[in-house]
Image (cartoon, rainbow, N blue to C red):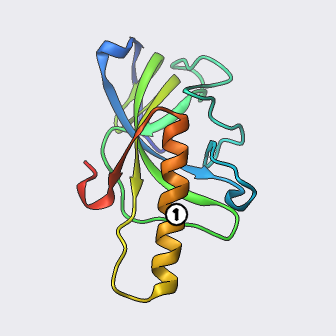
Amino acid sequence: MCIIGKALEVLNLIEDDNVIGYREFYIKDVFKGNRILSGLNYTKDLQVPIGESDAIPTLDNTNGLWSYNYNYYNNYNYNYYNYCVTAKIQNLGTTIKHEIGYRANKIKVLELVLLTPKDIDSTFNKFIEHFNSVVSESAKLYNAETVNHVNFK
């Protein structure tokens, strides 16, 4: 069984179906000006404005762009070169519904999550400002909204 549980059914989704998922993306090489999203375990960059998997998901394979069917947001990770950002996405096209998630051959990024500056120190707040700037620029590429982490649902 995969991390999103047992495969239950095949869905053929259009935008009006509004099947929402939650996942994280990397924004790699942020200091080289990159703002393209890339999956944590998916080496290919997510196309703009709608990402598409290399192969159609079926009940018998593990293809597709994975997401959870609940908001599992709890923290951010980053290193000097890559930022990790939480996103709300819409599953599109051939999609496999699992117990706690989906595998879709297409996804549309709806929201990317920003962090809130705190009264800790100026170095920390400079990082938050830079992080939010990078995430906001990425959101514009995907025609997505940004939302503060305290309001993310």
Q: Nearer the viewer, residue 135 or 7?
A: 135
Q: Position of residue 126 (x, y in %)?
A: 51, 76
Q: Is residue 1 visible?
A: no
Tag 1: residue type?
A: Phe
Query: Picture quarter containing residue 75?
Result: bottom left
Rendered residue at 75%/57% (across/down): 32
Q: Position of residue 67 (x, y in %)?
A: 44, 38
Q: Residues within 10 Å of mark 1 (few under 14, many from 20)?
A: some
- Reply above or below: 1 against 95: below
Q: Position of residue 25 (x, y in %)?
A: 55, 48
Rendered residue at 52%/63% (across/down): 131
Rendered residue at 47%/65% (across/down): 76
Q: Is residue 101 visible?
A: yes
Left or right of residue 12: residue 44: right
Residue pushed farthest right?
Answer: 32
**How many numbered circles are shown?**
1
Residue pushed farthest bottom?
Answer: 121
Left or right of residue 99: residue 41: right
Q: Position of residue 33 (x, y in %)?
A: 70, 53
Residue placed under numbered mark 1 in the picture: 131
Query: Picture quarter containing residue 130?
Result: bottom right
Rendered residue at 39%/53% (across/down): 113
Query: Picture quarter containing residue 37?
Result: top right
Q: Report helix, strand or loop for mark 1.
A: helix
- Reply above or below: 72 against 12: below
